């Protein structure tokens, strides 16, 4: 969903997802309307010598919901600092961070990649929980330094500090559960990767994460945890599956470049800019293609897709040419780019194919279908395109079909 940038920390953009803007008022309402219950819970955790007096906070709804709002904002501020802990350690190892985003289920630091060095991944994974525990301990120390009082300000300050102390420690504990790709799951993968290949360690951690997600979902359904836990379990399960799939593909495409997989320029079906839209649609139907590069001589001037052609009304398709409907904003890659990088570029741009350019020269085309076919060949023990550099794999050469 759409996100809004609110600032930068350590030169990292901090963004709010639209779902966060919906859930923050809900959290404020839930906390503010249940101060007495939360007060009893805090007292049971902190003990009778550190009792939180919530009586003064319930005098008016305005005070109660004001406290709830500050508590909710403080909780999510702790989440930002938790993610900032991950980010700071990741940047120390040279991993770029594109953003920290707050959303429905908390926060996420967008790392460009996770280091395959187990020690580095372990350090990055535990950094967030360490920050949360430090925030919890710091909040508790300030809480104990404020003596109990019967005024609303004192009661509110003590409640907020006690709440943030308990919730930050609880956040750290929950994140350390082995629900890959949560922090605990990444710790598990890092430990497994010390004695196993990285892809195998990911697969095992992902399976453990899926089992954890199933258990969390069942608890949410039948144990009184609520639909929030069910939704969280769903996203953990999907995240574990996606991470395992991505790691498998990265391992499979190691050493494979775009040039190994692409369709060479001389084999690429293209259209000229003066082709009519009606003729283009007939050709798409006959050749079962949904997109073509547009070439003016040997020069690429655009890309035209089925969606572009369908944007023209049927009665006008003979009058319009490809040049009038094509896109001139080209997504390109280089022939020596990594195949996995090309796939990620397609996903980020929301396109199904990339033009392969060697400088200003059009040398080929690579599509999702090309990548899927190559992946299937590699999984079956084949090598794609030119000979793989790692001769020790002893894989047979499989040429691209003409």
Image: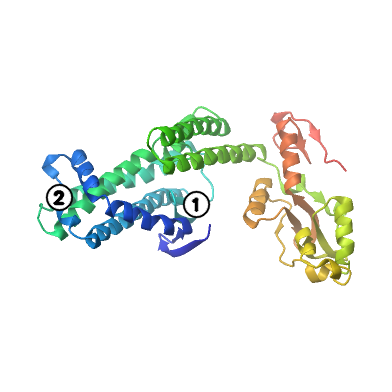
- Quarter in which the C terminus is drawn: top right
Label 1 to label 2: alpha-carbon separation: 40 Å
Residue drawn at x 72%, y 47% is: 368
**Residue sitting nearer the eye, 346 or 36:** 36
Residue drawn at x 80%, y 34% is: 397
Q: Residues within 10 Å of mark 2 (few under 14, many from 20)?
A: many
Q: Is residue 324 left or right of residue 160?
A: right
* Residue 25 position in % (x across, y down): 37, 58
**Residue sitting nearer the eye, 139 or 308:** 308
To which residue does mark 1 refer?
A: 110
**Residue sitting nearer the eye, 348 or 85:** 348
Q: Is residue 317 left or right of residue 218?
A: right
* Residue 284 position in % (x across, y down): 85, 55
Considering only vertical position in the picture, is 95 above or below 13?
Answer: above
* Residue 12 position in % (x across, y down): 45, 59
Mark 2 and mark 1 in contact (Cβ < 8 Å)? no
Q: Secondary structure at mark 2?
A: loop
| Circle count | 2
Q: Is residue 355 left or right of residue 320?
A: left
Please tell me which of labels 1 and 2 falls first in the chain.
Answer: 2
Considering only vertical position in the picture, is 296 above or below 372?
Answer: below
| Nearest-to-viewer mark from 1 and 2 | 2
To which residue does mark 2 refer?
A: 53
């Amino acid at each position: 969903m759409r996100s809004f940038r609110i600032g930068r920390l350590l030169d990292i953009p901090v963004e709010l997802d639209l779902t966060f803007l919906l859930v923050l008022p809900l959290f404020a309402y839930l906390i503010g309307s249940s101060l007495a219950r939360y007060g009893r819970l805090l007292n049971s955790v902190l003990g009778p010598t550190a009792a939180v007096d919530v009586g003064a906070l319930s005098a008016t709804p305005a005070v109660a919901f004001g406290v709830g709002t500050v508590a909710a904002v403080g909780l999510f501020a702790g989440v930002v600092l938790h993610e900032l802990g991950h980010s700071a350690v990741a940047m120390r190892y040279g991993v770029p961070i594109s953003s920290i985003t707050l959303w429905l289920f908390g926060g996420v630091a967008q790392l460009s990649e996770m280091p395959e060095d187990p020690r580095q991944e372990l350090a990055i994974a535990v950094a967030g929980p360490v920050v949360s525990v430090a925030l919890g301990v710091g909040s508790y120390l300030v809480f104990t330094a404020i003596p109990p009082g019967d005024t609303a300000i004192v009661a509110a300050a003590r409640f907020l500090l006690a709440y943030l102390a308990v919730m930050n420690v609880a956040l750290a504990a929950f994140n350390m559960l082995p629900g890959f790709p949560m922090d605990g799951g990444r710790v598990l993968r890092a430990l497994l990767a010390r004695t196993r290949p990285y892809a195998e360690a990911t697969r095992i951690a992902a399976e453990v994460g899926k089992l954890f997600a199933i258990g969390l979902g069942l608890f949410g359904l039948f144990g009184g945890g609520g639909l929030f836990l069910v939704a969280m379990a769903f996203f953990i399960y999907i995240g574990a599956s996606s991470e395992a799939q991505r790691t498998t593909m990265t391992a499979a495409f190691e050493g494979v470049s775009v040039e190994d997989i692409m369709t060479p320029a001389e084999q690429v079906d293209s259209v000229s800019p003066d082709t009519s839209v009606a003729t283009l649609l007939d050709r798409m139907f006959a050749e079962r293609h949904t997109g073509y590069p547009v070439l003016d001589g040997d020069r690429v001037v655009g890309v035209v897709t089925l969606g572009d052609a369908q944007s023209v009304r049927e009665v006008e398709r003979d009058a319009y040419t490809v040049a009038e409907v094509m896109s001139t904003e080209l997504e390109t890659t280089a022939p020596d780019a990594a195949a996995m990088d090309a796939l990620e570029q397609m996903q980020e741009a929301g396109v199904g194919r990339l033009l392969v350019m060697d400088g200003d020269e059009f040398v080929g085309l690579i599509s999702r279908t090309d990548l899927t076919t190559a992946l299937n060949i590699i999984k079956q023990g084949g090598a794609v395109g030119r000979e793989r550099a790692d001769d020790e794999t002893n894989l047979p050469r499989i040429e691209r079909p003409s």
